[in-house]
Image (spheres, rainbow, N blue to C red):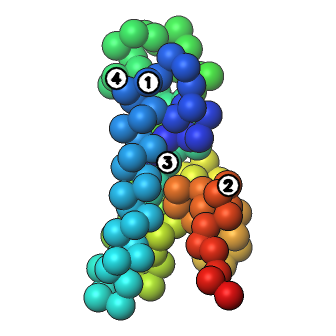
Amino acid sequence: TTSLAAMWSATNTTYGGSKAGHEALAAVMARELDGTGVTSNVLVPGGNTYTAMTASFLGEKRKEELIPANIMKAPYRWLASDASSHFTGQRIVAYNWDENLPLENRLQIAAAPAAWPQLGGFPRSRG
């Protein structure tokens, strides 16, 4: 998806809104599919990223200021592997993914619940 700041940006109405919807969908799917063996997560670069889309309007002049798109490779490979079979409902920030750390530490630094449930106090207990 994208960062929360990009979702809420006044200049990104369609982009931000669609990414927010995507992240919410991934979080709901994770809950609905729990126990089926199907996982649902999101992977974000972690900031402005140099891609074919951004290159088309930025050119080479700002390439060094942006995150390289290949930063997504390592966490993507892990998410696509059997090693992540019980990992669901999370967002991974690729910029924070450090292959030099043990997996548990990587996840502590790079992962958090998808769709920012802590912002709304969800899920709430019905005590």
Label whose residue precedes the other's in the sequence (1 or 3): 1
Classed neighbour count for the residue bearing mark 2: other residues with Cα under 10 Å, few (<14), some (14–19), many (≥20): few
Q: For this view, does 44 lie left or right of residue 29?
A: right
Quick one: label 2 or label 4, which is nearer the N terminus? 4
Identify the residue shown where x is 47% and y is 23%: 12
**Residue tagged by mark 2?**
119
Distance (Cα) linking label 3 and label 4 = 16 Å
Dots 3 and 4: beta carbons under 8 Å? no
Q: Secondary structure at mark 3?
A: strand
* Tag 3: amino acid: Val
Disc 3 crowd rating (10 Å Cα; few below 14, some 14-19, many 20+) is some
**Residue 52 in sight here:** yes
Q: Which mark is residue 53?
A: 4
The residue located at (52%, 60%) in the rendering is 114
Find residue 56 and report its horizontal and vertical position in percent.
Answer: 34, 13
Q: Is residue 53 above or below residue 37?
A: above
Spatial CA span between label 3 and label 2: 19 Å
What residue is shown with label 3?
Answer: 44
